[in-house]
């Protein structure tokens, strides 16, 4: 993970986002840094989010003084350190990237996405580090769950379902790591972190009302091949896109498509807000076959609606993903189905 640099600190102020628990640290930071004006900005505060504005002031009229610089350096180092361990500490999920055949199955309220960008020449080293912790969890019968997906653009994505943001404060790795060799743990951690060009974490909210399940279910094989579409947008287009995704679901219902898909929407964190639409197939051959069948079944209506959705986005990214059971742990073998 890249350490934040001074470019993240805008002249005059720094906007920080944290969980409510982290907000409790504000008085302590203020006491230790009286030259800083720290306050909540009501314009940005949302139900589960604490947005903190740190205005760095000095006798030079808003320029950063030495104490302000020192605070930013300390915060940057702390944020980088915590982020590196999020890769490990948050891998506690069952698979999340796709729909389960059972419409009544539990759907988490939120899903943490951890995206690791790994260059091709570092993949084997990275996988070695992840495998060490995966094997450790298996050896110690750890009470943890995580899923790993390898995307066609070089990312490794981990998914972590949660019922509340309070779960961000939990550390399920502590007990297991205590039982493992400290030198080997350090080696594996170095293999992982040394292989990354970038890493990010963000929360998404599964949109059950926009996701699609066939009314009449055809026999479906649990799959490991995932078709994924990222729709990046600006906030002013959020409501319009939600309506258009509703129209897409209505189209699939009207045409009687037998392939399910899920819809997620970013809820907090990440560089840009986006929607994620995904569907799971047995393998690439089934994906290719069904894609042609659905294209013929929906015709121009799908193409026109998809183009309309894209016109309200800043970028659309289409990728495929392979579920990696060898880098995932669930206590038992599973596939990519939720």
Image: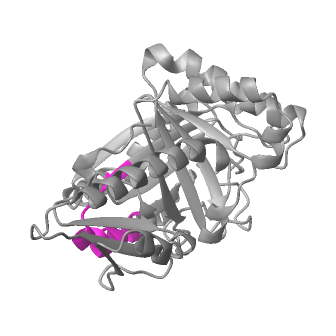
User: Is residue 243 covered in magenta?
Assistant: yes
Tell me what residue is drawn at x 62 percent, y 30 percent: 189
What's the colour scheme? one colour
- Where residue 202 appears, as percent x and y from the top left, is 47, 56
Using residue 68 as the reference point, say whether residue 11 is left or right of it.
left
Relative to 303, say whether 163 is above or below: below
Using residue 20 as the reference point, say whether residue 297 is left or right of it.
left
Relative to 215, say whether 173 is above or below: above
Residue 214, by quadrant, is: bottom right
Relative to 104, say whether 277 is above or below: above
Residue numbers of the magenta segment: 230-248
Residue 98 shows up from this direction:
no
Q: Main secondary structure of the magenta part?
A: helix
- Where residue 119 appears, as percent x and y from the top left, is 42, 22
Using residue 58 as the reference point, say whether residue 180 is left or right of it.
right
Tell me what residue is drawn at x 33 percent, y 78 percent: 44
């Amino acid at each position: 993970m890249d350490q934040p640099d001074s470019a993240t600190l805008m002249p005059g102020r720094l906007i920080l986002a944290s969980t409510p628990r982290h907000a409790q640290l504000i008085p302590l930071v203020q006491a230790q840094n009286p030259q800083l004006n720290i306050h909540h900005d009501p314009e940005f505060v949302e139900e589960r989010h604490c947005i903190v504005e740190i205005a760095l002031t000095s006798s030079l009229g808003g320029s950063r003084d030495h104490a302000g610089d020192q605070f930013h350096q300390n915060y940057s180092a702390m944020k980088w350190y915590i982020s590196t361990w999020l890769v490990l500490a948050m891998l506690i999920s069952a698979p999340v990237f796709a729909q389960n055949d059972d419409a009544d199955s539990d759907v988490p309220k939120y899903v943490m996405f951890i995206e690791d960008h790994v260059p091709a020449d570092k993949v084997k080293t990275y996988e070695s580090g992840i495998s060490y912790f995966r094997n450790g969890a298996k050896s110690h019968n750890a009470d943890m769950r995580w899923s790993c997906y390898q995307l066609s653009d070089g990312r490794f994505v981990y998914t972590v379902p949660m019922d509340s943001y309070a779960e961000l404060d939990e550390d399920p790795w502590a007990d297991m790591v205590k039982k493992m060799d400290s030198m080997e743990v350090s080696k594996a951690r170095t293999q992982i972190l040394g292989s990354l060009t970038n890493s990010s974490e963000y929360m998404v909210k599964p949109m059950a009302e926009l996701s699609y399940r066939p009314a009449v279910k055809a026999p479906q094989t649990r799959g490991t091949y995932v078709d994924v579409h990222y729709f990046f947008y600006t906030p002013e287009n959020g409501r319009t896109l939600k309506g258009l995704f509703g129209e897409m679901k209505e189209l699939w219902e009207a045409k009687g498509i037998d392939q399910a898909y899920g819809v997620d929407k970013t809820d907090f964190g990440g560089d840009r807000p986006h929607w994620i639409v995904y569907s799971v197939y047995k393998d690439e051959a089934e994906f290719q076959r069904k894609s042609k069948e659905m294209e013929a079944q929906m015709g121009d209506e799908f193409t026109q609606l998809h183009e309309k959705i894209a016109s309200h986005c800043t970028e659309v990214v289409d990728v495929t993903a392979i579920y990696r059971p060898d880098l995932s742990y669930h206590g038992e073998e599973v596939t990519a189905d939720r």
